[in-house]
Amino acid sequence: MRFSGHLILHPDGRIIGSTLLTEADRDRLRAELHNISTAAFISLPDTRVVIERVRKPKTLYCFGAGHVSVPTAHIAALAGFRVVVLDDRGEFANPERFPDANKIHVIEDFSRALEGLEVDSDSFIVILTREHRYDRVVLEQALKTTAGYIGMISSRRKRDAIYEALMNQGVRREELEQVHSPIGMDIGGETPEEIAISIVAELISERSKQPA
């Protein structure tokens, strides 16, 4: 088998690397990226190509370092997310409890929880703080970002109370309708680990809908 070159095709048309493929061949390969999830062979008129879709890592910002956050961070890391944990308690937000986290921030106050974070469309925000008043404060800040996903743990009753308080402060209902709350897929989970599985399942589902 002889290799004639390799390259990276960006969605915006940029090319990195070298190859003998024609522009028409590259256009076909770019189109095929939407049809594959792992490596695959594609036959072209004069050659055969191995193609693999490379996804940009998504960052999960996990606000709160309590009993649900621990398995959520662990499972999310296994699923390929870059995990950042934030809490105002150093005895909870530490490497011993979150060995899989890429970063851990002990913040001073949840009212400034998102300061200094690089939140964009590749960011997933999960709100799991210890009190609903902190959930509301973090959600208010999260809604001002371009995060690709925002989820908040809560019962429907407490969620509605938080939403009403935010709307009284000027937040539009349309903004709140984009929030996933109660968070996670409905799998009937009750333990922290089961709830974490339902959360990460939803994260994976939403990630699959987003551009690579």
Image: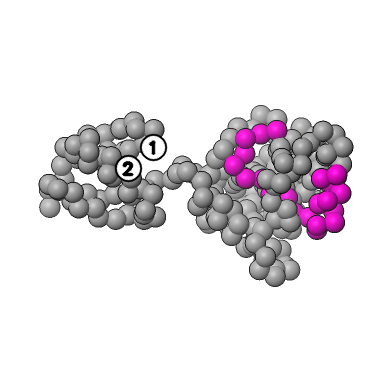
Looking at the rendered structure, the secondary structure element under dot 2 is helix
Q: Are marks 1 and 2 in contact (CB under 8 Å)?
A: yes
Between the residue at mark 1 and the residue at mark 2, the CA separation in whole angstroms equals 7 Å
Q: Is residue 108 magenta?
A: no
Residue 212 vertical position relative to residue 1 in the rendered view, above or below? above
Residue found 80% across the figure and 57% down from its top: 156
Residue 126 vertical position relative to residue 192 in the rendered view, above or below? above
How far across and down, in percent of the image, does residue 67 sit? Answer: 74, 58
Range of magenta residues: 144-164
The local crowd at label 2, few if under 14, some if 14 to 19, many if 20 or more residues have their Cα within 10 Å, is some
How far across and down, in percent of the image, does residue 44 sit? Answer: 18, 49
Residue situated in front as seen by the camera: 57 or 98: 57
Q: Is residue 160 magenta?
A: yes
Looking at the rendered structure, the secondary structure element under dot 1 is loop
What kind of residue is marked 1?
A: Pro
What kind of residue is marked 2?
A: Arg
Query: From where the camera sits, is residue 142 visible?
Result: yes
Residue identifier under label 2: 30
Residue found 29% across the figure and 55% down from its top: 40
How far across and down, in percent of the image, does residue 88 sit? Answer: 78, 41
Residue identifier under label 1: 11
Query: From where the camera sits, is residue 91 visible?
Result: no
Counting residues from the start of the chain, the first of labels 1 and 2 encountered is: 1
How far across and down, in percent of the image, does residue 6 sit? Answer: 24, 40
Image quadrant for the C terminus? top left
Residue found 62% across the figure and 39% down from its top: 147
| Image disc number at residue 77 | none
